[in-house]
Image: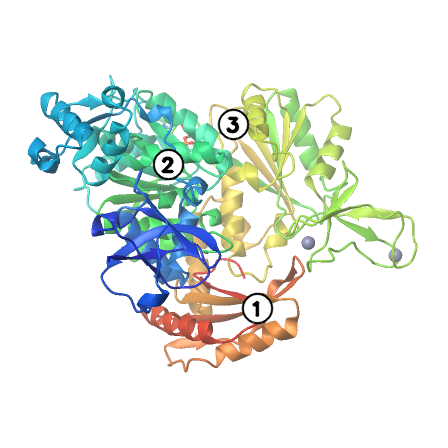
Amino acid sequence: MPIIRIALNVPVDTLFDYYAEDASTDDIGLRACVPFGKKHLTGIIIAVVAESEVPPAKLRAVKSIFREIKPLSQELLLLFNFCSHYYHYPLGKVIMNGLPLKLRNNQSLQLKDNQTDNQYSLTSAGKQITVKDIPARQRIARRLLVEFHCSTVISHRQIQQISPRAIPLLKDWLTWEWVAAIPKISTSIAPNLGPPLTTEQAHAVVEITNDDGHFKTWLLHGITGSGKTEVYLRIIASVLAKNKQSLVLIPEINLTPQLEAVFRERFSAIPLVSLHSGLNDTERLMNWLQAQSGEAKIILGTRLAVFTPLPNLGLIIVDEEHDTSFKQHEGLRYSARDLAIFRAKQINIPIILGSATPSLESYHNALTHRYHSIRLTSRAIENARLPTIEYIDTRTDKRREGLSSALIDAISQCLAEKHQSLIFINRRGYAPVLLCRSCGWSAACHRCSSRLVVHLRDKKLCCHHCGHDEHFPRACPDCGNQDLAPFGLGTQRVEETLAAHFPSARIARVDRDSTRRKHAWKDILQAIHTHQVDILVGTQILSKGHDFTNLSLVGILNADTSLFSTDYRASERLFAQLMQVAGRAGRAEIPGHVMIQTEFPEHQLYRALQRQDYDSLAHALLAERKAARFPPFVHQALLRAESHAMHDVMDFLQQASRLVAHTNTIEMFDPVPAQIARLKGMERAQVLVQSNSRNQLQKFLARWYTEINRLSVHKIRWTLDVDPVEF
Ligand code: ADP
Ligand code: ZN
Ligand code: ZN
């Protein structure tokens, strides 16, 4: 009897074998439900074999194989396999991480009505089948085949009319590839016209579309407002003309509605789906199915979308490629950007990475000609100029409630001119805390090594790491002092200060709290675009890719906190973020002005920013990284571990460090506590390994991973983080 080898969503890096009477190698990639201990689990069939290492007496039988759709193509299986090997993570968990929730449960899929209009025809294999090949007692199968031979195309509804029992046959025939769905023919495939391209845009489009369509990584390095989106749209149009699919990855779910609208307007006749965590399970499944069937031609999604089955993919775009949200920060710590490049290479198609401030890795790859760089150096809209950048030296212009008088004056002028202003608060590692000024006590989370953040509005203290919240204490728990006051600057506090200064101004706060509600962000965007907002106050969210045409002033507070960070990527990120925020100003006819409050106006980063000179800063940072042996000049991995007691974690890491004798190509550092040493009640520490050679590092990690798995560890959770971006 055939045996299926199946990948399950369990934290063990192995496949599981089951008898399956009717299985054949055609079933690879299908879902199957199997008994596992006392439960049933659903996984994906990875192989069908004749023999197993498990003794026959112990081998159990599959409960059911779900044949209604095949979630995994050969191509996707390769991608998942690569992902599992590269990130040293169990294949079953990698696959399940990439599938919509509705495909992970033990139920067969009830395909909804919107599939019923599909049309089908016989494949060349199907045409070989004659009625005589089908046993006479299978009356319905015979009738269906006759119908197919008579009329070349049959719709789902017609098949249903033959007999409801013909539908399961259709599904079988689809899996056996006797029949295939015909892509719906849209009336007009031609996109609506965009604006005439600028010379630089035209050059970019020509260079990429005139290439042979084979694998190549393009770095579209264009300043903010240079019209990268328009370049994407034109290239996608040329991919559509070949009837191929385009996958567009974007960092933030917040960017989807805006970008989706632009795409839908341009390609109004073309099936487009989005895939992101803001969709409910059914929506996500439906969109995924449309992508999987080849019907959706444009797929717009966040990092998870890199795992979408796309039978006819012709192009991948990674917008804002420098953004760290492309890296998953828990569980399977994959980089969607890097996997996208692997995927493009695997099926030999072009990939475009776009950014105004490329990651130093990508920039370095462009310098060394591994990527092909295309630059856009001027803004797309005529007369739109880059904003002027001014520094306010807060050593001389003292701040009141965080705002300097120069900035307040600028905001009043902006209000008088009926333009919008944006006040950006850099909150990385900095937020208002509750402080006792008589003894120095500050409110901390009892589960994490972090301070609680003051949320004035609901009079609450919240932990931004674990979500714990509590009420304000009435007095200092250490000394009894009743005069506790927030210290530091938060969005709410700045919002209140501004409201006091400008009582008639309409102020909108944009941060993680104010955008939590489902349509909150859409509403705020709407208000901004219909000029119902005068002053925007916000954090990171505001810095990304938005296009606010009436915005003329950007004020930046607290940027200095990232200048002297221990994280070697902090400068790169600060620069990218400030360039992005500054880029929000003066995008259309209105000239933009940026004011940055700082105590270090002479800092090289600020100097480079003022000249909008990414290259000189990037070169300086790369030189620093080379000297200090940081990526991209070395390749890194972290062994992360956590447990309830720090000494257990350290013991485990010590033990792990000694497991594999490492050669001189691998550098291994001592175990150290993580930057956030306590999180959700768990103590965390890590070991860093690095190498000049990615290959050597991978070989080492593979051996190390096997050995660590053999350690008998209790109460320790550990994981490897390959190419870590935070420490
Ligand atoms: P980027 O993503 O490079 O920061 P966008 O794609 O958001 O820039 O484009 C900035 C603005 O320029 C948008 O309002 C866009 O509609 C406009 N734009 C882009 N290309 C052109 C063009 N060729 N002619 C006129 N306007 C353009
Ligand atoms: Zn906490
Ligand atoms: Zn006190």
Crowding near pointer 1: few (<14 within 10 Å), some, many (20+)? some
The residue tagged with tag 3: helix, strand or loop?
loop
Q: What separation in Å lies between label 3 and label 2 (alpha carbons)? A: 32 Å
* Separation (CA) of disc 1 from disc 2: 36 Å
Q: Position of residue 227 (x, y in %)?
A: 38, 32
Q: Quadrant of residue 87?
A: bottom left
Most extreme residue toward the front is: 137
Closer to us: 672 or 75: 75
- Sequence-first disc among 1 and 3: 3
**Label number found at residue 288:** 2
- For disc 1, the marked residue is 716
- When the figure is inspected, residue 605 is found, relative to residue 204, above or below; the finding is below
Quarter of the image with the C terminus is bottom right
Q: Position of residue 81 (x, y in %)?
A: 32, 57
Quarter-wise, where is residue 265 in the image?
A: top left
Q: Residue at x 34, y 51 (%)?
A: 44
Looking at the picture, tell me which residue is in the foreground, 130 or 469. Answer: 130
- Tell me: is circle 2 under 8 Å from ligand 1: no
Secondary structure under the numbered disc 1 in the rendered image: loop
Q: Which residue, given by chain and number where applicable, does mark 3 sit on?
A: 548
Residue 607 in view, yes or no: no
**Quarter in which the N terminus is drawn:** bottom left
